[in-house]
Image (spheres, rainbow, N blue to C red):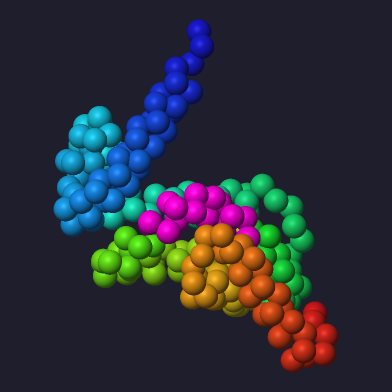
Amino acid sequence: MTSSRPLVERKQRQARQRIIEAAQELFREHGFNGVSVGDIAERAEVGRTTFFRHFHDKQEVVFAREQELLDTITAAGQTDDAAPPRSVSEAVEQLGPILLTLCARASVDPKGYTDHFALIERHPELRDRDAAKVQQVGDRLSELLVRRGADEATAVLAGQIALACFQTARRLGNNPHTLVDDTRAALTRTLALGTSATGTTTR
């Protein structure tokens, strides 16, 4: 007998996606404060129990994409076989492609990206949650390096440097059309700074 698990999982993913899309529509129409969990559940045609199976509160729905990106970092660390970085510079270099992939995925829908951050800017409680989510990206990047064999000090520093490059791109206009290029430029300048300060990359 064929297992029904794939069907159940597919229905769960579909319900989660309907909740996300319903919340985005309602936030655009009524603002964050004008929308309740009940409103989202009704628009998504799911029960409140189903909503809370996927999200703790309506704030978490706003950051559903960020959670998917965090999960992507974790998955990358579980499947790769990269050698342990021998320096902070090498660790940052290793994180570069992963960070750029995250930027590309985050900005694949430019309008959705712009709307997302416009919503965050209008609500202090969302800005606080955004700051926490961004820091989680740095932490996950550091954890990935530790799994590759980096010592904790190197991993934490490299993770924070990579995170700073992303934050630089966000401060430079947070443009979804140039997010990848702006982050890549920040990474390049950071690595060049390390080289010019030491003459050669520390090993």
Which quadrant is the C terminus positioned in? Answer: bottom right
Specify whether 69 is left or right of 151.
left
Q: Nearer the viewer, residue 164 or 49?
A: 164
Instruction: Identify the residue at image location x=28%, y=51%.
Output: 28
Q: Is residue 33 magenta?
A: no
Is residue 203 shown above or below 63?
A: below
Residue 111 among magenta residues: yes
Q: Is residue 141 visible?
A: no
Point 43% across, 28% down: residue: 9
> x, y percentage for residue 83?
77, 61
- Asked whether, in this view, residue 159 is left or right of residue 65, the answer is right
Residue 60 percent across, percent down from the top left: 32, 53
The correct choice, above or below, for 85 with respect to 102 in the image is below
Q: Main secondary structure of the magenta part?
A: helix
Q: Could you tell me how many numbered marks the image carries?
A: 0
Q: Nearer the viewer, residue 195 or 42?
A: 42
Q: Which residues are magenta?
A: 99-116
Image quarter of residue 150? bottom right
Where's residue 165, x and y in %? Answer: 58, 74
Left or right of 73 on screen, residue 43: left
Q: Is residue 153 visible?
A: yes
On the rendered structure, is 155 left or right of 125?
A: right
Residue 15 vs 100, above or below: the answer is above
Q: Residue at x 20, y 51 (%)?
A: 30
Instruction: Residue at 51%, 65% (x, y): give it.
Output: 175
Up-down: is 84 above or below 64? below
Q: Position of residue 122 (x, y in %)?
A: 28, 66
